[in-house]
Image: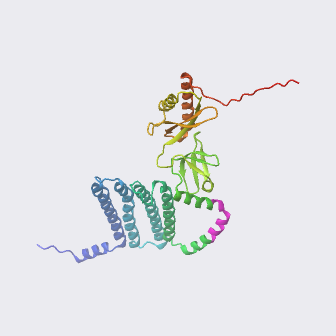
Amino acid sequence: MVYTVDSSIQKEILEYISDPYVQAITLLIGSFIIAKIIDYFITNLLRSFVRDTATSIDDRLIDYLHRPIYYSILFFGWALSFQLADLPLTIQNPIISILKTILIVMWSSSSIKVFIDLISWYSSRDSSTKIIQKRTLPLFNNLSQIFIFIAASYFILLSWDIDVTAWLASAGVLGIVLGFAARDTVANLFAGIFIMADSPYKKGDYINLDTGERGYISEIGIRSTRIMTRDDIEITIPNNVIANSKIVNESGGPHEDERVRITVSVAYGSDLDLVKRLLVGMANTTEGVCKTPSPRARFREFGESGIVFQLLFWIKKPESRGLMVDEVSMKIYKSFNENKITIPFPQREVHVVSKDK
């Protein structure tokens, strides 16, 4: 048995299907379904393949990218549906521009996260010839954010049909004016780039400046560097000041441990072997002194009033230098007293000769 459809019904169906609003709604629903299917594929199937890999960087990349991909497919379908619905341009264009702006912001945010994770992962790899290292991470992080921000701003202007050429010309003139008006700020920006490239210190290092500031590096920015002092006071120093200062990085070098020296004199005639044992013993019994490298005592010179020794030991935290010197010096003095070892001090004998008149 063959069923036939009345030509009038066929005509109504064709008219219904060809209706632009029906096509627009169908496209809206279709784009939502396709976006959901692709998002499911990325977040579930693709994640199952990378779950057992040696690194977690691929898992984080999926977390960063699946949402922008989902909304890109969804908004693309919406934009086409608005065009099929033949909405007035006064309504259609602003809506499409808003969708483009949202996508640009989402992709920019995800791109920053992806770039920072990738360069952090690359910097953690063992290689002596790599360009990106832990010390230069702030430079690449800041430059990537600036570049992505500029690119995002450019594409947002294009999405709203703004003449970028005229803006660039105006920005060039404005840049020259601001360059003269804000010379200090520009100097700080360039100094910040040079500091990040040269990396005389990194976040967490303990530094001393010839201007008197000292403390841990809490933040390295393009314009300024922040130092946290031992009094829990954060000091913000313009990068131009730091770039022109002498920097002593007590956390620098191949080892982060810092060596401390204590100089002490003993009287001539003292038991030198006992002196060495006592000095090393006082350092070994002080909490906060490193066991490796081990403390050591060195004979330095024959002084005017006594024999000069120097105790050398290492500490983990540079800011505890004063405390360690205090504790070890107190122990040395008490130990010398108990063992009858004299700590000499300069003395002068004055002979008064009376002359009879």
- Colour mode of the rendering: rainbow
Is residue 10 in view from this perspective?
A: yes
**Quadrant showing the N terminus:** bottom left
Q: State the residue in front, 224 or 131.
A: 131
For the image, the number of numbered tags is 0
Q: Does 116 appear above or below 88?
A: above
When asked about the image quadrant of residue 321, the answer is top right
* Magenta-drawn stretch contains 181: yes
Residue 76, x across and y down, in percent: 39, 67
Is residue 163 in view from this perspective?
A: no
Residue 253, x across and y down, in percent: 49, 49
* Magenta-drawn stretch contains 345: no
**Quadrant showing the C terminus:** top right
Q: State the residue in front, 218 or 350.
A: 350
Q: Residue at x 36, y 73 (%)?
A: 20
When asked about the image quadrant of residue 192, the answer is bottom right
When asked about the image quadrant of residue 108, the answer is bottom left
Which residue reaches farthest right? 357
Q: Magenta region, mostly helix, strand or loop?
A: helix
Residue 351, x across and y down, in percent: 76, 26
Tell me where the magenta segment starts and ends, as one range. Answer: 173-185
| Left or right of residue 169: residue 86 | left
Q: State the residue in front, 167 or 324.
A: 324
